[in-house]
Amino acid sequence: MNVPFTLQNSGLEAEFIKGAAKENMVELRQHKSIGGMRASIYNAMPLAAVEKLVAFMKDFQARFTSVNKFGFIYAGAQKNVGPSGVTIVIIKKYLIGNDGIYMCGLAFEDLLDQGGLVEVEKKNKKKAEILYNAYDGSDGFYRCPVEKSVRSLMNVPFTLEKSGLEIEFIKGAAKENMVQLKQHKSVGGTRASIYNAKPLTGVEKSVAFMKDFQARNGFANAW
């Protein structure tokens, strides 16, 4: 008549009860002796209702504990989805080498068209070199707070000597369609992201803007 049950992850019980209630399956909360939940299947409970509960239980398990229904799982590392980078866990073996991973396939094709990882690395080093040289050659107007030996090729943080100018810098850059420069989460200031998808011309445009901004706001003859 009463069928008690618990979930392996007790933290999901409230979610289970809530989801079941949306399907008009109620009064499942807490068996008085063992806790957890309980399904009452007295004479008035039709077979169809039991089958509906079981179907919900299977769906709930699939959503919270199983990855078998997925071919692969992807997760962007922060904003690095697409050509910039992507983290993938392959679940089904047949997808390896298959065009099922469409977006990743496009990204890999682009990398190959550029000459493969070796050539892309060279381009990334060149982009980073241009930016860091701009900071280091500005007589302190722009400052990179990261030690040279551990500087990133992907995210380049920098501050302005006059911190009050940072808002003006970001605002002016936005007018030139250079966005998402606001505040590096660790060191503050601003930061330029130069992932694989960032073209060399974009970096050169950024440096040109930096020089012009510096000329208009101080240290005009530093370069």
Image (cartoon, helix red, strand yellow):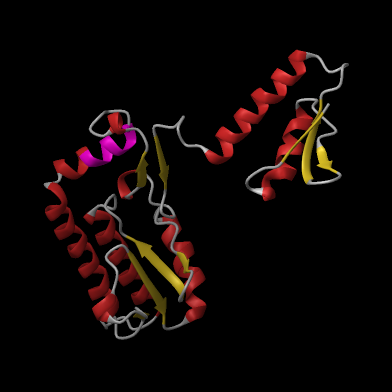
Q: Residue 60's quadrant in the figure?
A: top right
The answer, for residue 223, to whether it is visible in the render is no
Q: Residue 81: x percent and y percent?
A: 38, 46
| Near-viewer residue (45 or 187) | 45
Q: Residue 14: x percent and y percent?
A: 74, 44
| Near-viewer residue (202 or 188) | 188
Residue sitting at 28 percent across and 76 percent down? 150
Helix, strand or loop for the magenta stretch, by majority: helix
Residue sitting at 82 percent across and 43 percent down? 30
Q: Residue 15: x percent and y percent?
A: 71, 42
Q: Residue 203's quadrant in the figure?
A: bottom left
Quadrant where the N terminus is found in the figure: top right
The answer, for residue 177, to whether it is visible in the render is yes
Q: Is residue 62 magenta?
A: no
Is 77 situated above or below 212? Answer: above
| Near-viewer residue (125 or 44) | 44
Residue sitting at 26 percent across and 69 percent down? 131
Q: Residue 83: x percent and y percent?
A: 30, 45
Residue sitting at 28 percent across and 55 percent down? 202
Residue 4 located left or right of residue 84: right
Residue 4 located left or right of residue 176: right
Q: Residue 51's quadrant in the figure?
A: top right
Is 39 situated above or below 189? Answer: above
Quadrant where the C terminus is found in the figure: bottom left
Residue 119 located left or right of residue 162: left
Identify the magenta region.
101-108
